[in-house]
Amino acid sequence: MLEAHLEAFETKMRQAGLPREIIDTFGDYYRQLVNGETGLIPDAEIQPVAEGAIPSLDALGDYVQTGVEALPRSVMIVLNGGLGTTMGLTRAKSLMRVKDGLTFLEVIVGQTARRRVRLALMNSFSTDRDTREALDRIAPAQAPLMFMQHKYPKVLRAGLAPAHWAPAPELEWNPPGHGDVFMALWVSGTLDRLLNEGIRYALIRNVDNLGASLDEGLLGYLAAENLPFMMEVALKTPSDVKGGHIARHRSGRLILREAAQCPPSEMEAFTDITRYRFFNTNNVWIHLEALKELIRQNGRVRLPIILNPKTLDPRNAQSPPVYQIETAMGAAIGLFEGAGAVRVPRTRFIPVKSTNELLAVRSDCYVFTDGQLLRPNPQRSAPEIDIRLDPAFFGHRERFNARIPVGNEPSLKDCRSLSVTGDVRFEAGVRLVGAVRIVNNGPTQAVIPAGSVIEGDLVF
């Protein structure tokens, strides 16, 4: 039965035009699934990483000059496969206007142009066309390299056969996770092209985290210490309890454990931020020659499997239960002898996963530096802001923009927290101070007049 199913999977992937190397990689993971491999990493196999065991970015000043010299041999690789469906987007998330009227893509193109470093984008089947059309309009002086993320077929939990869904065949496939970036670099020829251009060092980051940059201290540390792989980690806060954390495996290597890899009975320990202190920011650095050598030795990059249980149609709870086979990019830390991690400030981790975070970034909580890097507003004295917008009225981007139009974002630099319940629209020039709670219990939309200053509770 295994061989019959595996043959069916291979035929399906071959008909979809997927490369032989990716079909073989999926086959490895499928065999693990059939053999009962869950990908779970119990506490008995790992130990927390002590705070003093990881160098801090602010202690890497001596490496800055090395980093400056390494910039011409560096590339920023951006994961550009997402659509931002949680915010109701149907196009590439990178094309959403995020700050000062600029899209994620425009900001990233500007960042790399100013630093004169190479830019590469890993697009998906969902984002490639939109991204190419947008780059034609942006017309950067040096076009970024682009390569494609692959896709894996979904696996029926009952019987482990390929999933079929006649109403929407595209739902028979899932993204393989950002761990696919390494094989995608190799199979596409992008890895060899970069090496042939003299590029040796890469920062790989998400498109929606504008806090990440080719920092000279981090780059210099990677180059001077000849690290094959390096992960940026930050101290966990209560908002990061479900984020993947690093740990020391009993083999002695650092590893990454995602929430989906934690046994359900041990989730209390997983979410204990005093035990597992460091979460993965998903900013990783890699020595490209070390990556090529790893692939040369093993034939492919074999990351720990993540089984993500879903329904075949995520919008239909009655559709068949499936497994999505995925891998995490950061898990490669366990594949390289001598891989390391650096503790970084949260200024390098400013993801936009929801409209709550979108409001924070669009507002004066954050500003651009001269190098178009996103940083907290130096005029802001309060800690990281806590924003909670009513998802019924602000959860999707179109609803959000209708109530907080671009350019009408309230001033939040003096705001500690903001909670909005009900249908509320902001006019221009509103200023929020301290802890603000706005509630509209009425049947019609409430309007915050232009120029208003609000402190405390406002109930309509």
Image: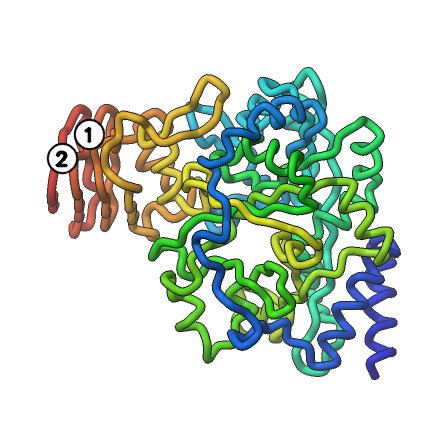
Q: Quadrant of residue 453?
A: top left
Comparing 225 with 244, the one in front is: 225
- 447 lies left or right of 330: left
Comparing 380 with 223, the one in front is: 223
Please, is residue 102 above or below residue 271 in the view?
Answer: above
Q: Name the residue that disc number 1 marks.
A: 431
Q: Position of residue 279 (x, y in %)?
A: 47, 54
Q: Amino acid at mark 2?
A: Ile
Q: Position of residue 145 (x, y in %)?
A: 74, 31
Q: Name the residue that disc number 2 marks.
A: 454
Query: Considering the image in quadrants, where does the C terminus appear?
Result: top left
Instruction: Indicate the secondary structure of the residue bearing disc 2.
Output: strand
**Mark drawn on residue 127:** none
Q: Earlier in the sequence, mark 2 or mark 1?
A: 1
Query: Considering the image in quadrants, where does the N terminus appear?
Result: bottom right
- What residue is at 51 percent from the left and 34 percent from the top? 60
Q: Position of residue 124 (x, y in %)?
A: 68, 45
Q: Position of residue 259 (x, y in %)?
A: 51, 65
Please, is residue 194 above or below residue 18 in the view?
Answer: above
Q: Quadrant of residue 195?
A: top right
- What residue is at 61 percent from the left and 27 percent from the top? 67
- What residue is at 70 percent from the left and 57 percent from the top? 335
- 130 lies left or right of 351: right
Q: How many neighbours does mark 2 have within 10 angstroms: few (below 14), some (14-19), or many (20 or more)?
A: some
Residues at marks 2 and 1 touching, judged by CB atoms closer than 8 Å? yes
Q: Is residue 62 visible?
A: yes
Image mark count? 2
Q: Amino acid at mark 1?
A: Arg
Comparing 228 with 360, the one in front is: 228
Q: CA distance from mark 2 to mark 1?
A: 6 Å
